[in-house]
Structure formats: structure tokens, C-alpha cells
Image: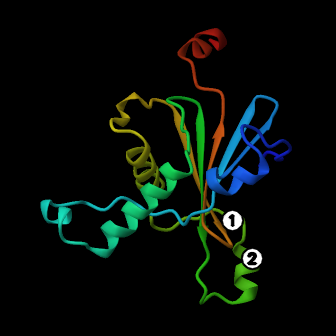
Amino acid sequence: MVEATHLIGWSAKLQGLFGHCWRKGNDTMQIVDVTPVTKPRQTKRDKWKQRPCVMRYRAYADHLRAKMLDIPECGYHLIFIMPMPKSWSKKKRDAMRGKQHQQTPDKDNLEKAVLDALYGDDSCVWDGRVSKFWGDKGRVIVRSIPAFRLEELNETS
């Protein structure tokens, strides 16, 4: 992971309000401390019936918007840190910390929840990468990465 060396955009006092934003060279990274959730399949009844999964997603989406998480239309790496279950032993937690998260929820469902929360119409998003890892607490991290360009393919052939 990129070493976070420089706080940009706002003072340390505002850091808690807006989340963390770091820059090293051309690499920008935003960190929001929140447990990632997926977007549930909603029904018409969800407008008035408060199912727990829908309320959890709405709180998650509100939190991401409040932290002003910014995902570009291209060239992003969305990293989800999934919290380890409290029922795991200390030995297992130490062994799994930082390892790939290869269970549900799927990475595409996590990405969809973030994009739907931040974009009214996310069809404009065309290039991005998603990863999931185990950690002590939930986090959503967005890094800027170079976007793929089709011209690069023609240059190498």
C-alpha cells in the first residue's frame, strides 16, 4: 500500500469530519472508517417499511456522502477492509490481518453499493479496480491509479 505522507485539502481539525485524504506524488488516497455493506434489493415497501438491511445501507450511503468520498469516473482502486469477526481467536486474527477477503460479500456488490451511494447514474464510471482485505476495523479506501487507455495496447503490439 502507498505510504501516506501528506494530508491535503483541509486541516487536521476537519480530518474527522471529512475522512482522511493523503497524497504522495500523483497518487491520492481517501480513507473512510466505516464497515462496508452491500446494497440490498429494494422493494416498493422499503419506502415505508424499515427493514434492517435497507436501513443499514442507507446509513452507510449517508456516511459516505457526509465524508465527501470522491470516486473519479476512471482510474480508481477501491479497497474494502472487512472487519474480522469478534468470535475469532487472537491467533486467527493475527494470521488473517491484511490477507485477501475471499468470502461474501462479493467485491462487485460492495463496489455497486458505493457507486450507487455517490452517483445518481453510475453509467459514467468506466474504469476501476476493487480489492477486499481482512482488517481490525471496517474501512473504505479510494486510491487514484492510471486509467487504462486502448492506445497503450496498440503501442505494445
* 10 Å crowding of disc 1: few (<14), some (14-19), many (20+): few
Q: Which three-letter amino acid code belongs to the residue tagged 2?
A: Ala
Please tell me the numbered disc located at residue 11: none
Secondary element type, mark 1:
loop
Q: Residue at x 41, y 53 (%)?
A: 113
- The amino acid type found where label 1 is placed reads Lys
Q: Residue at x 41, y 55 (%)?
A: 109
77 above or below 74? below
- Classify mark 2: residues with Cα within 10 Å, few (<14), some (14-19) or many (20+): few
Colour setup of the view: rainbow
Name the residue tied to disc 2.
95
Locate residue 79, reporting x and y percent.
61, 51
Residue underneath mark 1: 99
Residue 106 seen: no
Asked whether 3 or 58 is in front, the reply is 58
Question: Is 149 or 114 nearer to us in this picture?
Answer: 114
Look at the numbered disc 2 and give the secondary structure of its residue: helix
Q: Nearer the viewer, residue 44 or 14?
A: 14
Are the two marked residues, 1 and 2, in contact with CB atoms closer than 8 angstroms?
A: yes
The residue drawn where x is 76% and y is 28% is: 26
Q: Quadrant of residue 125?
A: top left
* Outermost residue to the front: 13
What is the x, y in percent for residue 16?
Answer: 68, 57
Q: From this viewpoint, is residue 71 visible? A: yes
